[in-house]
Image: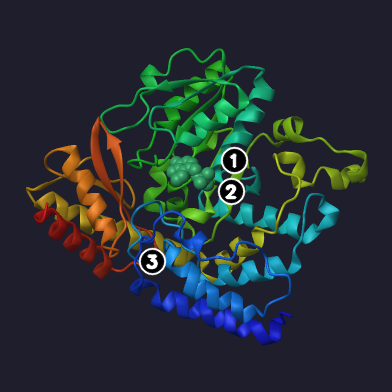
Amino acid sequence: MTDLRRDGPAALEWAARYLERVSELPVLAQVEPGQIRGRLPTSAPEEPEPFEAVLRDLDEVLLPGITHWQHPRHFAYFAVSSSEPAILAELLAATLNSVAFLWRTSPAATELEAVVLHWTAQLLGLPEGWHGHIEDTASTSTLAALIAARTATGRGTVVCSEQAHSSVEKAARMLGMRLRKVPCDEEFRMRADAIGDLSEVAATVATVGTTASTAVDPVPEIAEACEAAGTWLHVDAAYAGAAMVCPEFRWAFAGVDRADSLVVNAHKWMLTPMDCSLFWSRRPADLRAAFSLVPDYLRTPDAEDSLSLSEYGPALGRRFRALKLWAVLRCVGASGLREHIRRGVSLAERFEGWVAKDPDWELCAPRRFSVVCFRLCGEDERNQELARRVNASGEIFISGTVLAGRHVLRLAVGQMSTREEDVEQAWEVLRREAAGL
Ligand SMILES: Cc1ncc(COP(=O)(O)O)c(C=O)c1O
């Protein structure tokens, strides 16, 4: 049988050792589809095994099939760092195993969630008094916003830019809502002058920090149009929202105080592990109107009812996600978060400088935060082959996208352990592989 006192230290040692050695492992898993599954038994064991067997197989069987998101040279997607206080808090949350669907099923979980959302709202410079709760992902937060908007307005159309995250289109599709995509300007921001008639539109989604190039939509102009038409404004700041802890990036949140709802993923750039998506709204009554459905077996006195966070979003069972964010806010502090954001941005800036100086390479979008969009001069195929080769090296992991019809490479900085030498190595690997094309 597993025993916390006997097996716990080994698991913690595994975690500590993993973080020390992760930079020595290939970033992108170098396995073929089915390879890991083929090494696992086809049925669960009949008799219990010791926990040390699980740890052993984690090393021997699973680790080769892990793409290392905690790796300092994981530059492919927006960084998702799991910091030490949050790792420990996840262990404690699993130990408590609260299911906070009603206030009374875990008052502290519900109330701490309100407190950490309030603290974070202050850190990001949001208006006082917004309702805030945690969803699993930004996809769910945006889905929730669109549901509330449809219920509040009785309309069936969603508007976003052609650079909005696919979660907006997916939510509209799941809801059977029509989607209209607004064209972008040369810097990949929604063209507010092309937003069109919003009188039949339930919700407009503006993005602060688009996925491909981290562009910032003109939220003040979009808010103006939404207010005039009675349209719900949802702001997707899943990645860039975290940067608002630093006053120098607050320009990007201009107009966000006029939003009806906002999503920022703490599990992206805020040192908190998956999953922890922060959802705020200044219209909690509209959320409750859309989501409150309390069956007899869950009825409690009304004062308690209105605090139950399951009445403000799609899920009933809610795990104690606030604990890990609380641990991060307390053990890293606002100063530590600012330092973390600034480090990522300044490393991206350095990389951008090297690309700008080299005539064989070109920058493809303005760098707003910690993502650099760039390419090797020449055809798309060369860039695709280059990405394939650098990723196969296991030394770095980058991603690609299409901007203005061309294939572009993306270097997303922001992992907590990334240092200057890691970004230098990325540039070296890219130039080495480019020379061999
Ligand atoms: C701008 C933006 N919105 C939403 C999402 C979806 O996030 P999640 O995986 O939390 O659903 C992403 C993912 O990277 C994103 O970049």
In whole angstroms, how far apart are the C-alphas of marks 2 and 3?
25 Å
Residue drawn at the location 22% of the way across and 59% of the way down: 350
- The image position of residue 216, as x and y in percent, is 38, 37
Q: Secondary structure at mark 2?
A: strand
- The image position of residue 211, as x and y in percent, is 39, 41
Q: Secondary structure at mark 3?
A: loop
Label 2 CB less than 8 angstroms from ligand 1: no
- The image position of residue 302, as x and y in percent, is 89, 42
Q: Picture quarter containing residue 379? A: top left
Instruction: Name the front one of labels 2 and 3.
Output: 3
Residue drawn at the location 54% of the way across and 60% of the way down: 273
Label 2 crowd (10 A; few <14 / some 14-19 / many >=20): many
Residue drawn at the location 67% of the way across and 65% of the way down: 44
When the figure is inspected, residue 344 is found, relative to residue 261, above or below; the finding is: below
Q: Pointer 1: what residue? A: 141
Q: Amino acid at mark 3?
A: His
Whether residue 23 is visible here, answered yes or no, is yes
Label 1 CB less than 8 angstroms from ligand 1: yes
Q: Pointer 3: what residue? A: 71
User: Left or right: 292 with respect to 432?
Assistant: right
The label shown at residue 278 is 2
Q: Amino acid at mark 1?
A: Ser
In depth, the one of 66 and 212 nearer the eye is: 66
Instruction: Name the front one of labels 3 and 1.
Output: 3
Label 1 crowd (10 A; few <14 / some 14-19 / many >=20): many
Q: How many marks?
A: 3
Answer whether labels 1 and 2 touch (C-beta < 8 Å).
yes
Residue drawn at the location 79% of the way across and 47% of the way down: 308
